[in-house]
Amino acid sequence: MTFFCIADKDSSLGFRLAGIETREALTRPEAEEALRLALATQDVGVILITTKVARFVKEQIEKRTYAQQMPLILEIPSRGETSKPYSAGDFLKRAIGIDI
């Protein structure tokens, strides 16, 4: 299994340097197309999506999170954005829908 990243322009470079296949998305249609590509790629096990891009496809991400096990879709902070810290329980709830 591999990682696939969908990121805004500022965040994408770091993932590319780490060797993760990355698609930049600056608009809703670009985000939707990148998500379709990631979901269609057979060996992708984890899709990383930055918060700036996730705003475009939030509804699609939520539907898939509760409907399918694979691939796992994780929303990560965009470069330069601060986010409130999440507990391990909050992270699991957001990632896989389990409340502990």
Image (cartoon, grey):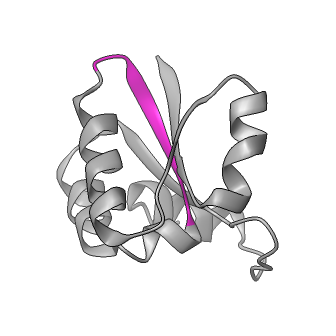
Name the chief secondary structure element in magenta: strand
- 77 sits left or right of 23 in the view: right
Span shown in magenta: 42-50
* Residue 8 place in picture, x, y as percent: 59, 61
* Residue 16 place in picture, x, y as percent: 69, 33
* Residue 84 place in picture, x, y as percent: 76, 83
User: Which sits in the foreground, 65 or 60?
Assistant: 60
- Residue 81 appears in which quarter of the rendering? bottom right
Examine the rendered structure and indicate whether residue 51 appears above or below residue 84. Answer: above
User: Which sits in the foreground, 80 or 47?
Assistant: 80
Examine the rendered structure and indicate whether residue 43 appears above or below residue 15. Answer: above
Q: Is residue 44 visible?
A: yes
Q: Residue at x 70, y 38 (%)?
A: 15
Q: Residue at x 69, y 22 (%)?
A: 19
Q: Which residue is drawn at 28% across and 18% down?
A: 42
Residue 48 lies in the magenta-colored region: yes
User: Which sits in the foreground, 72 or 81?
Assistant: 81
Q: Residue at x 48, y 57 (%)?
A: 95
Examine the rendered structure and indicate whether residue 10 appears above or below residue 68. Answer: below
- 20 sits left or right of 27 in the view: right
Residue 85 lies in the magenta-colored region: no
User: Which sits in the foreground, 13 or 52?
Assistant: 13
Q: Is residue 57 visible?
A: no
* Residue 17 place in picture, x, y as percent: 78, 30
